[in-house]
């Protein structure tokens, strides 16, 4: 693979590179401690995706369309902050390294926002309630970015090995699952055990405290556990010129990088579709599938079980397939399972709820969870590879900026997804008052909601296939990138000493 060589590279000081590259294997202990950090973003995202829209409509009394807009606007504001945070962490230097100080600052912000968002006595579809909900939601998102962006960038910095990056991401996925369990079990097993609890402010206050505890535990274990490892990374000791360009210049280069554009576009699209479906989950469970309140946890637990089962399955698949092909497999499985689950329940299994229909829902949720493992491990690892390609082409390491694009995609899934979900709810006739009173809706509205939630989203996933197929940075090409990168650094060292 031959990439364009930059006109100027690393002008300030030598870069030490071994003559023969060997796989950069990390101790299991390091992977475990580093993986804990994924729980911070996962826990915050899970609570926001699952409960926030329902909280704003059923407790605060904000209309679904307005609530969806609040979440969307908060993500737009956060999206502006994401590249600034990512680029800032690329260029920062401290005795704790480039990334860890941002993670330390982000933790308390997440905790304060998670408690205040659900504890502040907001009431009614009024300007003060809407403004406060927006402000606190923005605080939660920005705090999560301050932790998640630098943390994700460390995936590319801990190791440059193609397969070891997938292994590191697997551990991140495992602890993402752990964080979800730490929130799901008490949330649905203790806090939300009746339908009345979904409209209780006290229940959501407990949810905020639960999120705060999970974030502090996992975040501190990660920061304290990997500090020494992070400080000895080669990327912490690159010369300043490797991160010397302006944010505007770096973004311009990103827009010229084909691999980045494909990864960003496909990740953004897939996550938005998944975010819209997730935002509608509780509504679909209650109105289409007609699950009792105590049964709402079944498909959610099933998705998490699928997520867990998908981790070793992804590891096995990655030994035989390229990362891109694993992502494509996940797209196909979701498209088929989501479409068939609703069509089978609607056309063949009779009035709901019934055991067969619930079993179909549980199976589809498990498949969705497993495919989420495919997506997370695949995309996170592919972005780390693309960072190396970018350095070869443009002479700059933009780990934080690259991962800010991926985190932006994830948050857009919540923002755009919630906006789409709010519009769907308004179309089918579910306003805040109806949700709060658990009012019945027409059979047509129930069917329309279910079909859009399942078959509509399932078919939408397929539209991503042509874009994903265009991604071409595979194992052999990445090996060639690393070889050329080493050669450039060695040439620089020779010229520097000469």
Image (cartoon, rainbow, N blue to C red):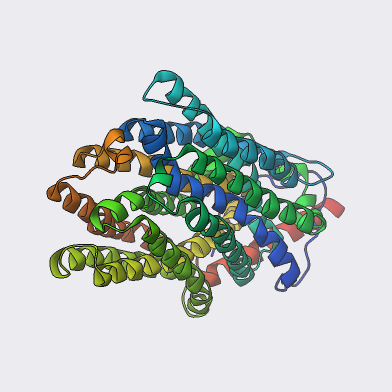
Looking at the rendering, which quadrant does residue 21 occupy? Answer: bottom right
Dividing the image into 4 quarters, which one contains the C terminus?
Answer: bottom right
Nearer-the-camera pick, 365 or 335: 365
The furthest residue to the right = 497
Q: Is residue 216 visible?
A: yes
Vertical order, 353 against 135 (above or below)? below
- Could you say where residue 488 lies in the image, as x and y percent from the top left? 70, 58
Split into 4 quadrants, where in the image is the N terminus? Answer: bottom right
The image shows residue 280 at horizontal and vertical percentages of 33, 49
Does 285 sit above or below residue 364?
A: above
- Asked if residue 446 lies left or right of residue 34, the reply is left
Name which quarter of the figure residue 371 lies in: bottom left
Q: Is residue 84 left or right of residue 434?
A: right
Residue 83 appears in view: no
Instruction: Name which residue lies at 30% across and 40% down.
Output: 435
The percent coordinates of residue 98 (x first, y second) are: 74, 45
Q: Does residue 374 sit above or below 244 in this rendering? A: below
Q: Residue at x 72, y 62 (%)?
A: 33
Quick one: 299 or 44, which is closer to the camera? 299
Image spot of residue 155 (x, y percent): 64, 58
Query: Is residue 229 or residue 466 the one in the foreground?
Result: 229
Question: Relative to 357, is 229 on the left or the right?
Answer: right
The residue lying toward the viewer, choosing from 455 and 66, is: 66
Number of numbered discs visible in the structure rendering? 0
**In the rendered image, which quarter is residue 342 located in?**
bottom left
């Amino acid at each position: 693979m031959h990439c364009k060589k930059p006109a100027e590279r690393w002008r300030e000081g030598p870069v030490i590179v071994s003559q023969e590259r060997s796989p950069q294997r990390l101790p299991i202990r390091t992977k475990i401690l580093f993986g804990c950090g994924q729980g911070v973003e996962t826990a915050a995202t899970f609570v926001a995706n699952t409960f926030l829209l329902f909280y704003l409509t059923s407790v605060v009394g904000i209309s679904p369309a307005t609530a969806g807009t609040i979440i969307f606007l908060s993500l737009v504001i956060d999206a502006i902050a994401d590249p600034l945070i990512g680029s800032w962490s690329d260029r920062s230097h401290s005795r704790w390294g480039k990334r860890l100080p941002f993670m330390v600052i982000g933790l308390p912000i997440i905790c304060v926002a998670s408690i205040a968002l659900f504890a502040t006595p907001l009431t009614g579809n009024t300007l003060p309630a809407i403004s406060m909900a927006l402000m606190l939601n923005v605080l939660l998102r920005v705090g999560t970015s301050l932790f998640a962006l630098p943390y994700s960038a460390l995936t590319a910095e801990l190791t440059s090995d193609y397969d070891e990056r997938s292994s590191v991401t697997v551990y991140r996925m495992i602890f993402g699952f752990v964080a979800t369990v730490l929130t799901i079990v008490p949330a649905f097993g203790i806090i939300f055990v009746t339908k009345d609890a979904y409209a209780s402010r006290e229940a959501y206050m407990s949810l905020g405290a639960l999120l705060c505890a999970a974030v502090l535990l996992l975040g501190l274990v990660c920061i304290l556990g990997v500090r020494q490892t992070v400080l000895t990374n080669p990327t912490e000791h690159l010369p300043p010129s490797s991160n010397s360009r302006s944010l505007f210049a770096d973004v311009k280069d990103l827009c010229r990088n084909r691999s980045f554009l494909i990864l960003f576009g496909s990740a953004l699209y897939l996550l938005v579709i998944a975010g819209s479906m997730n935002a509608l989950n509780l509504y679909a469970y209650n109105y289409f599938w007609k699950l009792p309140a105590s049964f709402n946890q079944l498909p959610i637990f099933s998705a998490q079980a699928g997520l867990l089962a998908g981790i070793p399955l992804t590891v096995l698949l990655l030994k035989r397939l390229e990362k891109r092909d694993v992502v494509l497999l996940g797209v196909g499985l979701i498209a088929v399972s989501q479409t068939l689950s609703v069509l089978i329940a609607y056309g063949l299994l009779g009035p709901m709820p019934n055991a067969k229909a619930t079993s179909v829902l549980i199976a589809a949720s498990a498949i969705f969870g497993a495919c989420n493992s495919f997506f997370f491990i695949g995309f996170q690892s592919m972005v780390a590879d693309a960072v190396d390609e970018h350095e070869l082409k443009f002479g700059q390491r933009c780990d934080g900026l690259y991962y800010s694009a991926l985190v932006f995609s994830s948050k857009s899934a919540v923002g755009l997804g919630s906006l789409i979900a709010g519009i769907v709810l308004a179309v089918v006739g579910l306003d805040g008052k109806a949700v709060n009173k658990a009012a019945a809706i027409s059979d047509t509205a129930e069917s329309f909601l279910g079909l859009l939630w399942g078959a509509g989203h399932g078919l939408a996933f397929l539209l991503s296939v042509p874009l994903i197929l265009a991604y071409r940075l595979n194992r052999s090409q990445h090996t060639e990138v690393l070889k050329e990168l080493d050669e450039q650094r060695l040439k620089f060292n020779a010229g520097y000493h000469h």
